[in-house]
Image (cartoon, rainbow, N blue to C red):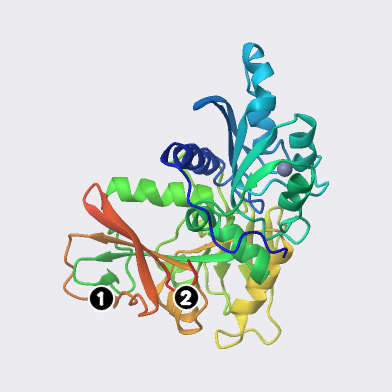
Amino acid sequence: MAEINPDAPALAAGEQRFLRRCFQLARLGAGSVSPNPMVGAVLAYDNRIIGEGWHQRYGEAHAEVQAIRAVARADRNLTPRSTLYCALEPCFHHGKTPPCVDLILEQKIPRVVVSSIDPNPLTGGQSVAKLRAAGVEVIARALEAEGRSLNRAFFTWMTQKRPYIILKWAQSADGYLGRAAERTPISGPLAQRLVHRWRSEVDAILVGAKTARTDNPRLDNRWYSGKSPLRVALDFSGKIPGNAHLLDDSMPTWILGGKRPGQWKNTTFLPLAGAGPDLDWIPFLLEKLHAGNRAILLVEGGAYTLRQFLDNGCWDEIRVLENPVRLGGGIAAPRVPESARLETSGLIGTDRVEIWLLSEAW
Ligand SMILES: [Zn+2]
Protein backbone atom coordinates (compact mmCIF):
# COMPACT_ATOMS: atom_id res chain seq x y z
CA MET A 1 0.00 0.00 0.00
CA ALA A 2 1.29 3.47 -0.85
CA GLU A 3 2.55 5.55 2.05
CA ILE A 4 -0.08 8.23 2.65
CA ASN A 5 0.53 10.37 5.70
CA PRO A 6 2.96 9.39 8.41
CA ASP A 7 0.53 10.68 11.04
CA ALA A 8 -3.20 11.05 10.96
CA PRO A 9 -3.88 14.79 10.70
CA ALA A 10 -5.81 16.76 13.27
CA LEU A 11 -9.13 17.95 11.93
CA ALA A 12 -11.07 21.03 13.03
CA ALA A 13 -14.20 20.28 15.06
CA GLY A 14 -16.54 21.33 12.24
CA GLU A 15 -14.81 19.00 9.83
CA GLN A 16 -14.87 16.13 12.34
CA ARG A 17 -18.62 16.57 12.46
CA PHE A 18 -18.91 16.13 8.69
CA LEU A 19 -16.72 13.05 8.74
CA ARG A 20 -18.69 11.53 11.61
CA ARG A 21 -21.84 12.20 9.60
CA CYS A 22 -20.21 10.02 6.91
CA PHE A 23 -19.75 7.21 9.47
CA GLN A 24 -23.37 7.59 10.55
CA LEU A 25 -24.61 7.40 6.94
CA ALA A 26 -22.29 4.48 6.22
CA ARG A 27 -23.90 2.38 8.97
CA LEU A 28 -27.24 2.58 7.14
CA GLY A 29 -25.74 0.12 4.68
CA ALA A 30 -25.10 -2.50 7.38
CA GLY A 31 -26.31 -5.87 6.18
CA SER A 32 -26.85 -4.75 2.57
CA VAL A 33 -23.39 -3.99 1.20
CA SER A 34 -21.23 -6.86 2.46
CA PRO A 35 -18.66 -7.95 1.35
CA ASN A 36 -18.20 -4.31 0.31
CA PRO A 37 -17.32 -1.76 3.00
CA MET A 38 -19.91 0.54 4.55
CA VAL A 39 -19.31 4.01 3.15
CA GLY A 40 -20.94 7.37 3.65
CA ALA A 41 -20.01 10.64 1.92
CA VAL A 42 -20.82 14.29 2.55
CA LEU A 43 -20.29 17.25 0.24
CA ALA A 44 -20.02 20.50 2.17
CA TYR A 45 -19.65 24.12 1.12
CA ASP A 46 -18.94 26.89 3.60
CA ASN A 47 -19.87 24.78 6.62
CA ARG A 48 -23.13 23.57 5.06
CA ILE A 49 -23.92 20.11 3.74
CA ILE A 50 -25.09 20.42 0.13
CA GLY A 51 -25.18 16.70 -0.62
CA GLU A 52 -24.83 13.42 1.23
CA GLY A 53 -25.28 9.74 0.53
CA TRP A 54 -24.22 6.24 1.37
CA HIS A 55 -23.54 2.94 -0.31
CA GLN A 56 -26.95 1.36 0.03
CA ARG A 57 -26.70 -2.01 -1.65
CA TYR A 58 -23.99 -4.28 -2.96
CA GLY A 59 -23.39 -3.60 -6.65
CA GLU A 60 -25.22 -0.27 -6.64
CA ALA A 61 -23.99 3.35 -6.66
CA HIS A 62 -21.22 4.23 -4.23
CA ALA A 63 -21.58 6.84 -1.49
CA GLU A 64 -19.64 9.50 -3.40
CA VAL A 65 -21.95 9.17 -6.41
CA GLN A 66 -25.01 9.38 -4.16
CA ALA A 67 -23.69 12.50 -2.38
CA ILE A 68 -22.89 14.30 -5.65
CA ARG A 69 -26.25 13.34 -7.18
CA ALA A 70 -28.07 14.57 -4.07
CA VAL A 71 -26.95 18.18 -4.54
CA ALA A 72 -29.95 20.41 -5.27
CA ARG A 73 -30.04 22.14 -8.65
CA ALA A 74 -29.61 25.55 -6.99
CA ASP A 75 -26.43 24.37 -5.28
CA ARG A 76 -24.79 22.59 -8.22
CA ASN A 77 -22.55 25.56 -8.98
CA LEU A 78 -21.06 25.07 -5.49
CA THR A 79 -19.83 21.52 -6.13
CA PRO A 80 -16.52 22.69 -7.69
CA ARG A 81 -15.91 24.80 -4.57
CA SER A 82 -16.85 22.17 -1.98
CA THR A 83 -15.08 19.64 0.20
CA LEU A 84 -15.98 15.98 -0.14
CA TYR A 85 -15.79 13.93 3.08
CA CYS A 86 -15.53 10.14 2.73
CA ALA A 87 -15.60 7.37 5.32
CA LEU A 88 -13.20 5.38 3.14
CA GLU A 89 -10.83 6.27 0.33
CA PRO A 90 -12.81 6.59 -2.93
CA CYS A 91 -12.39 3.62 -5.25
CA PHE A 92 -9.74 3.61 -7.96
CA HIS A 93 -10.84 0.62 -9.97
CA HIS A 94 -13.70 -0.33 -12.25
CA GLY A 95 -15.81 -2.68 -10.17
CA LYS A 96 -19.55 -3.01 -10.60
CA THR A 97 -19.56 0.79 -10.97
CA PRO A 98 -17.03 3.25 -12.52
CA PRO A 99 -14.23 4.58 -10.27
CA CYS A 100 -15.30 7.33 -7.89
CA VAL A 101 -11.87 8.95 -8.11
CA ASP A 102 -12.63 9.90 -11.75
CA LEU A 103 -16.02 11.29 -10.80
CA ILE A 104 -14.39 13.56 -8.22
CA LEU A 105 -11.99 14.87 -10.86
CA GLU A 106 -14.77 15.27 -13.39
CA GLN A 107 -16.83 17.27 -10.89
CA LYS A 108 -13.74 19.45 -10.20
CA ILE A 109 -14.08 18.99 -6.43
CA PRO A 110 -11.01 20.81 -5.08
CA ARG A 111 -10.67 19.24 -1.63
CA VAL A 112 -11.26 15.74 -0.25
CA VAL A 113 -11.11 14.51 3.36
CA VAL A 114 -10.77 10.75 3.68
CA SER A 115 -10.84 8.61 6.81
CA SER A 116 -9.30 5.17 6.29
CA ILE A 117 -7.34 4.15 3.23
CA ASP A 118 -8.97 1.32 1.26
CA PRO A 119 -7.18 -1.96 2.15
CA ASN A 120 -8.32 -3.39 -1.20
CA PRO A 121 -5.07 -3.62 -3.23
CA LEU A 122 -7.02 -2.47 -6.30
CA THR A 123 -7.31 0.95 -4.62
CA GLY A 124 -4.87 0.86 -1.67
CA GLY A 125 -3.89 4.53 -1.63
CA GLN A 126 -3.86 4.99 -5.41
CA SER A 127 -6.93 7.24 -5.41
CA VAL A 128 -5.35 9.59 -2.87
CA ALA A 129 -2.22 9.70 -5.03
CA LYS A 130 -4.20 10.30 -8.23
CA LEU A 131 -6.23 13.11 -6.69
CA ARG A 132 -3.11 14.80 -5.32
CA ALA A 133 -1.33 14.45 -8.66
CA ALA A 134 -4.27 16.24 -10.25
CA GLY A 135 -3.96 19.11 -7.78
CA VAL A 136 -6.78 18.15 -5.41
CA GLU A 137 -6.03 18.87 -1.76
CA VAL A 138 -6.44 15.58 0.11
CA ILE A 139 -6.52 15.14 3.88
CA ALA A 140 -6.13 11.38 4.34
CA ARG A 141 -6.40 9.16 7.43
CA ALA A 142 -8.56 11.65 9.29
CA LEU A 143 -10.29 10.09 12.35
CA GLU A 144 -8.67 6.92 11.11
CA ALA A 145 -9.29 4.75 14.18
CA GLU A 146 -13.02 5.43 13.97
CA GLY A 147 -13.09 4.79 10.25
CA ARG A 148 -11.25 1.50 10.61
CA SER A 149 -13.42 0.39 13.49
CA LEU A 150 -16.56 1.14 11.46
CA ASN A 151 -15.34 -1.18 8.72
CA ARG A 152 -13.46 -3.69 10.86
CA ALA A 153 -15.34 -6.58 9.26
CA PHE A 154 -14.31 -5.39 5.79
CA PHE A 155 -10.69 -4.87 6.86
CA THR A 156 -10.58 -8.39 8.28
CA TRP A 157 -12.20 -9.82 5.16
CA MET A 158 -9.71 -8.03 2.89
CA THR A 159 -6.51 -8.60 4.82
CA GLN A 160 -7.14 -12.07 6.28
CA LYS A 161 -9.24 -13.54 3.46
CA ARG A 162 -11.82 -14.93 5.85
CA PRO A 163 -15.13 -13.80 7.36
CA TYR A 164 -15.17 -11.52 10.38
CA ILE A 165 -16.21 -13.72 13.32
CA ILE A 166 -18.63 -12.52 15.99
CA LEU A 167 -19.33 -14.83 18.94
CA LYS A 168 -22.59 -14.14 20.72
CA TRP A 169 -24.18 -15.60 23.78
CA ALA A 170 -26.86 -14.75 26.33
CA GLN A 171 -26.21 -15.59 29.95
CA SER A 172 -27.92 -15.38 33.32
CA ALA A 173 -26.64 -13.07 36.05
CA ASP A 174 -24.90 -16.06 37.63
CA GLY A 175 -23.16 -17.02 34.40
CA TYR A 176 -25.21 -19.81 32.80
CA LEU A 177 -26.26 -20.23 29.20
CA GLY A 178 -29.26 -22.32 30.16
CA ARG A 179 -30.36 -25.48 31.90
CA ALA A 180 -28.91 -28.68 30.50
CA ALA A 181 -30.90 -30.30 27.66
CA GLU A 182 -33.74 -27.84 27.95
CA ARG A 183 -34.57 -24.71 25.97
CA THR A 184 -34.09 -21.85 28.43
CA PRO A 185 -35.09 -18.43 27.10
CA ILE A 186 -32.88 -15.96 28.92
CA SER A 187 -32.98 -12.60 27.16
CA GLY A 188 -35.77 -10.07 27.51
CA PRO A 189 -37.89 -9.07 24.47
CA LEU A 190 -35.82 -6.00 23.55
CA ALA A 191 -32.58 -7.96 23.72
CA GLN A 192 -34.12 -10.63 21.51
CA ARG A 193 -35.03 -7.97 19.03
CA LEU A 194 -31.48 -6.65 19.12
CA VAL A 195 -30.26 -10.15 18.26
CA HIS A 196 -32.50 -10.12 15.20
CA ARG A 197 -31.03 -6.77 14.20
CA TRP A 198 -27.57 -8.33 14.52
CA ARG A 199 -28.76 -11.19 12.34
CA SER A 200 -29.90 -8.70 9.69
CA GLU A 201 -26.38 -7.26 9.63
CA VAL A 202 -24.39 -10.47 9.13
CA ASP A 203 -24.02 -12.88 6.22
CA ALA A 204 -24.20 -16.20 8.06
CA ILE A 205 -25.22 -17.56 11.48
CA LEU A 206 -23.82 -20.75 12.95
CA VAL A 207 -25.12 -23.06 15.68
CA GLY A 208 -23.91 -26.42 16.91
CA ALA A 209 -25.89 -29.65 16.68
CA LYS A 210 -26.91 -29.63 20.33
CA THR A 211 -28.38 -26.14 20.11
CA ALA A 212 -30.16 -27.16 16.91
CA ARG A 213 -31.70 -30.10 18.78
CA THR A 214 -32.42 -28.51 22.17
CA ASP A 215 -33.60 -25.05 21.08
CA ASN A 216 -34.90 -25.93 17.60
CA PRO A 217 -34.06 -22.36 16.43
CA ARG A 218 -35.26 -20.85 13.17
CA LEU A 219 -32.17 -18.65 13.00
CA ASP A 220 -33.94 -16.14 10.81
CA ASN A 221 -34.56 -12.44 11.27
CA ARG A 222 -38.26 -11.96 11.96
CA TRP A 223 -38.20 -9.16 14.52
CA TYR A 224 -36.19 -6.56 12.65
CA SER A 225 -36.22 -5.06 9.16
CA GLY A 226 -33.76 -6.32 6.59
CA LYS A 227 -32.62 -9.67 5.42
CA SER A 228 -32.16 -13.08 7.01
CA PRO A 229 -28.63 -14.46 6.70
CA LEU A 230 -27.47 -17.88 5.61
CA ARG A 231 -28.13 -20.48 8.32
CA VAL A 232 -25.34 -22.89 9.14
CA ALA A 233 -25.56 -25.84 11.55
CA LEU A 234 -23.11 -28.51 12.63
CA ASP A 235 -24.51 -32.00 12.25
CA PHE A 236 -21.52 -34.35 12.24
CA SER A 237 -23.43 -37.29 13.61
CA GLY A 238 -26.70 -36.62 11.79
CA LYS A 239 -28.71 -36.19 14.99
CA ILE A 240 -30.67 -33.06 14.12
CA PRO A 241 -34.24 -34.36 13.82
CA GLY A 242 -35.74 -34.28 10.35
CA ASN A 243 -38.57 -32.03 11.53
CA ALA A 244 -36.23 -29.38 13.00
CA HIS A 245 -36.69 -25.82 11.70
CA LEU A 246 -33.14 -25.88 10.38
CA LEU A 247 -34.04 -28.76 8.07
CA ASP A 248 -37.27 -27.20 6.78
CA ASP A 249 -35.56 -26.11 3.52
CA SER A 250 -37.39 -22.77 3.79
CA MET A 251 -34.29 -20.60 3.32
CA PRO A 252 -30.61 -20.93 2.37
CA THR A 253 -29.03 -23.32 4.88
CA TRP A 254 -25.73 -25.17 5.11
CA ILE A 255 -25.50 -28.34 7.14
CA LEU A 256 -21.98 -29.46 8.04
CA GLY A 257 -22.60 -33.18 7.87
CA GLY A 258 -23.77 -35.99 5.65
CA LYS A 259 -26.57 -35.54 3.14
CA ARG A 260 -30.09 -36.54 4.17
CA PRO A 261 -32.34 -38.28 1.71
CA GLY A 262 -34.88 -36.12 -0.07
CA GLN A 263 -35.22 -33.25 -2.52
CA TRP A 264 -33.49 -30.10 -1.30
CA LYS A 265 -33.86 -26.67 -2.82
CA ASN A 266 -32.25 -24.34 -0.28
CA THR A 267 -30.28 -26.75 1.86
CA THR A 268 -26.68 -27.65 1.08
CA PHE A 269 -24.94 -30.51 2.87
CA LEU A 270 -21.21 -30.10 3.33
CA PRO A 271 -19.74 -33.38 4.48
CA LEU A 272 -16.29 -33.33 6.05
CA ALA A 273 -14.02 -36.17 5.00
CA GLY A 274 -14.09 -38.58 7.96
CA ALA A 275 -16.52 -36.20 9.63
CA GLY A 276 -16.22 -35.75 13.35
CA PRO A 277 -16.30 -32.98 15.89
CA ASP A 278 -12.54 -33.23 16.49
CA LEU A 279 -11.70 -32.48 12.90
CA ASP A 280 -10.56 -29.09 11.78
CA TRP A 281 -13.98 -27.95 10.73
CA ILE A 282 -13.51 -24.27 11.54
CA PRO A 283 -10.96 -23.57 8.74
CA PHE A 284 -13.10 -25.70 6.42
CA LEU A 285 -16.18 -23.61 7.18
CA LEU A 286 -14.34 -20.29 6.97
CA GLU A 287 -12.98 -21.23 3.57
CA LYS A 288 -16.43 -22.19 2.30
CA LEU A 289 -17.89 -18.92 3.59
CA HIS A 290 -15.06 -16.96 1.99
CA ALA A 291 -15.61 -18.70 -1.33
CA GLY A 292 -19.33 -17.91 -1.03
CA ASN A 293 -18.65 -14.17 -0.42
CA ARG A 294 -20.03 -14.34 3.12
CA ALA A 295 -17.97 -11.73 4.96
CA ILE A 296 -19.49 -11.72 8.46
CA LEU A 297 -20.23 -14.81 10.56
CA LEU A 298 -22.28 -14.71 13.75
CA VAL A 299 -21.77 -17.73 16.01
CA GLU A 300 -24.82 -18.12 18.22
CA GLY A 301 -23.81 -21.14 20.25
CA GLY A 302 -24.00 -23.37 22.06
CA ALA A 303 -21.27 -23.89 24.62
CA TYR A 304 -19.28 -26.46 22.62
CA THR A 305 -19.30 -24.46 19.39
CA LEU A 306 -18.41 -21.20 21.11
CA ARG A 307 -15.54 -22.88 22.97
CA GLN A 308 -14.15 -24.30 19.74
CA PHE A 309 -13.82 -20.79 18.37
CA LEU A 310 -12.51 -19.36 21.65
CA ASP A 311 -9.97 -22.15 22.24
CA ASN A 312 -8.62 -21.75 18.72
CA GLY A 313 -8.37 -17.97 19.06
CA CYS A 314 -10.75 -17.79 16.13
CA TRP A 315 -12.82 -14.71 16.82
CA ASP A 316 -12.86 -10.97 16.19
CA GLU A 317 -15.69 -9.77 18.37
CA ILE A 318 -17.74 -11.09 21.30
CA ARG A 319 -21.24 -9.91 22.18
CA VAL A 320 -22.65 -10.90 25.55
CA LEU A 321 -26.20 -10.30 26.70
CA GLU A 322 -26.75 -10.69 30.43
CA ASN A 323 -30.18 -10.93 31.99
CA PRO A 324 -30.70 -10.28 35.73
CA VAL A 325 -32.35 -13.72 36.12
CA ARG A 326 -30.37 -16.28 38.20
CA LEU A 327 -30.54 -19.92 37.14
CA GLY A 328 -28.59 -21.42 40.05
CA GLY A 329 -26.99 -24.03 37.78
CA GLY A 330 -26.85 -25.42 34.26
CA ILE A 331 -24.47 -25.00 31.34
CA ALA A 332 -21.72 -22.54 32.24
CA ALA A 333 -21.30 -19.62 29.85
CA PRO A 334 -17.88 -19.23 28.24
CA ARG A 335 -15.55 -16.59 29.64
CA VAL A 336 -14.51 -13.57 27.65
CA PRO A 337 -10.74 -14.05 27.05
CA GLU A 338 -8.16 -11.82 28.70
CA SER A 339 -7.09 -10.60 25.28
CA ALA A 340 -10.44 -8.87 24.77
CA ARG A 341 -11.07 -5.18 25.25
CA LEU A 342 -14.51 -3.85 26.19
CA GLU A 343 -15.66 -1.69 23.29
CA THR A 344 -19.16 -0.75 24.47
CA SER A 345 -21.61 -1.70 27.16
CA GLY A 346 -25.12 -0.59 27.96
CA LEU A 347 -28.62 -1.67 28.83
CA ILE A 348 -31.29 -2.83 26.44
CA GLY A 349 -34.52 -3.32 28.39
CA THR A 350 -33.58 -5.55 31.31
CA ASP A 351 -30.41 -6.89 29.72
CA ARG A 352 -26.83 -5.69 29.79
CA VAL A 353 -25.10 -5.74 26.40
CA GLU A 354 -21.33 -5.93 26.20
CA ILE A 355 -19.32 -5.81 23.01
CA TRP A 356 -15.72 -6.97 23.22
CA LEU A 357 -13.02 -6.68 20.58
CA LEU A 358 -9.59 -8.21 20.24
CA SER A 359 -7.56 -5.58 22.06
CA GLU A 360 -4.55 -5.54 19.74
CA ALA A 361 -6.65 -5.31 16.58
CA TRP A 362 -8.80 -2.19 16.84
ZN1 LIG B 1 -16.52 4.11 -5.58
Q: Residues within 10 Å of mark 2 (few under 14, many from 20)?
A: many
Q: Does residue 220 appear in the picture of this structure?
A: no
Q: Amino acid at mark 2?
A: Thr
- Which residue is found at the position 38% from the left and 48% from the top? 194
First in sequence, mark 2 or 1: give its number.
Answer: 2
Front disc: 2 or 1: 2
> Spatial distance from mark 2 to mark 1, Cα to Cα?
17 Å
Given the image, on which type of amino acid does mark 1 rest? Gly
Q: Is residue 116 above or below residue 168?
A: above
Between 218 and 159, which is closer to the camera in this rendering?
A: 159
In front of the other: 303 or 194: 194
Say if mark 2 contacts mark 1, CB within 8 Å. Answer: no
Image quadrant in which you'd find residue 64 = top right
Observer able to see residue 95: yes
Q: Quadrant of residue 296?
A: bottom right
Which residue carries the number 1 mark?
Answer: 330
Residue 291 in picture, x, y percent from top left: 74, 65
Q: Based on the displayed image, in which of its 4 quarters is residue 332 positioned?
A: bottom left
Q: Nearer the viewer, residue 147 or 281?
A: 147
Left/right placement of residue 331 relative to residue 1 reads: left
Question: In this figure, which residue is indicated by the disc labeled 2?
Answer: 305
Where is residue 240? Give x, y as percent: 52, 69
Residue sitting at the far top: 74
Q: Secondary structure at mark 2?
A: helix
